[in-house]
Amino acid sequence: MKLTFWGAARTVTGSMHQLEADGKRYLLDCGMYQGRRKEAEQRNRHFPFPASSIDAVILSHAHIDHSGNLPLLVKNGFSGPIYSTPATVDLAHPMLLDTAHIQENDVKFLNKRRQYRGEDEIEPLYTTEDAEQTFPLFQAVPYYTPKQLSAKLSYEPHDAGHILGSSTVLLRSEENGRVVRLLFSGDVGRPGLPIIRDPDPPPAADYLIMESTYGGRSHEAADSVKDKLEEVVKRTAAHGGKLIVPSFAVGRAQQLAMLLKELSNEGRVPNIPMFLDSPLAFDVTEVFRRHPECFNDEARGFTTNGDDPFGFKRLTYIREASESKKLNDLTGPCVIISPSGMCEAGRILHHLRNNLDNPRCTVLITGYQAENTLGRKLLDKWPEVKVFGEPIRVRAAIESLQALSAHADQNELLAWMKPLAGTVRKVFLVHGEPEGGEALQKAIQEEYKVETVMPGWGEKFDLE
């Protein structure tokens, strides 16, 4: 087997790793890169290989930084199968359609300005039609079910505990009577998160591709989440402001909905309106409801009792853009949850444009913010940021709730890979910025004495 790292190499987003085995080429993920706009445009629009040369894609989970460039791959000539778990297949449909729709709308908005300035128009990476052409290629592979990819190569998904349907992928190659096992972690979740099950222990492997998003950090304890959320809601409401929560539509939005439901049921937050402003989050929540087999005991408890974990009287799901715009006219305190989680696209940009300069308001960052994203700038307390190209003074309070992170931190990653310490020969760290990756690399080599590398873009390795 041969590995080439094309995405999420010394950076967090754009997961894409090429595997060559048994005379065929496979992609492990095909994600969208997020960061500086010009760099993201260049990376996403141009594949470093002919799309038609790829025989199949194995998708670890549905987050856009892992799945978001699949329609462009298809648009450029890929026609093979896309394998993933049933829940991931169901999630990918609304997510890719939404991503295409956002691109179309954002390009339309930007082209009005470009036309006014006399600049050439730009095109979206792909359209909703391109996304529709991708869906027939998906093939569902349930957890713990071996799938034969070729005569000498198979793969089996295990639960990664990151989001609904997320998987750790075990690939098994057998040539000349010799077996080589490659494990791709995908994104590894944290024990004790709301809704989904804890990550499975990893199966035995000779080589490991492992994420390192929080490789140099430690999270707050997960049991502190409700207390912090309660405090931020109450303080913002007391100031008469809006609590703006950038959120990933998959996983984070549902976690927040369930936590706010619990806080409301317990009488711990004021009786103010709450909104989940995202047609995608609405559709994704419906997918969650269809896959209770992925839930942990707490979430299954709601469904067993005939209750909805993701809905309550004070929470309104908003689909239509016209209803979203009306939120700008609200004068009293409220909570608005809206994608995207890194503040790079979607309705959250409009809410930020309308509220960032209001000192009564609060922006609550609830997940990882990649370098150079608007969310990262807010988290780093930039005094002024640009939204839709216009500078805005940041007067709103900026708060962080990192205990909800769906990514394992350094100690959790070390604990997760411990069962592999006796068998794995080399670890490839991906999906992390250099500082975090280097910290995790050092920790793995000191703890387990296993060779650990951080591959760069385009770097190749033979797995023997």
Image: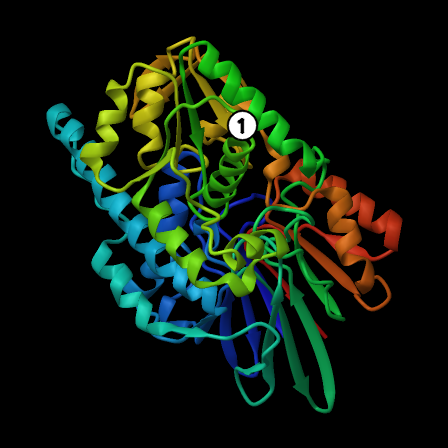
> Residue 160 versus residue 330: which sits nearer the camera?
330
Q: Amino acid at mark 1?
A: Gly
- Tell me: residue 416, above or below residue 78: above
| Residue 462 in view | no
> Residue 13 versus residue 254: which sits nearer the camera?
254
**Residue sitting at x 48%, y 48%:** 309
Residue 442: image x %, image y %? Answer: 81, 44
| Residue 317 in view | yes
**Residue sitting at x 55%, y 37%:** 368
Residue 167: image x %, image y %? Answer: 58, 63
Residue corresponding to mark 1 = 267
355 horizontally vs 362: left or right: left
Looking at the rendered structure, the secondary structure element under dot 1 is loop
Residue 203: image x %, image y %? Answer: 73, 69
Residue 184: image x %, image y %? Answer: 63, 63
Report crowding for label 1: few under 14, some 14 to 19, many 20 or more residues within 10 A (C-alpha): few
- Tell me: residue 92, above or below residue 211: below
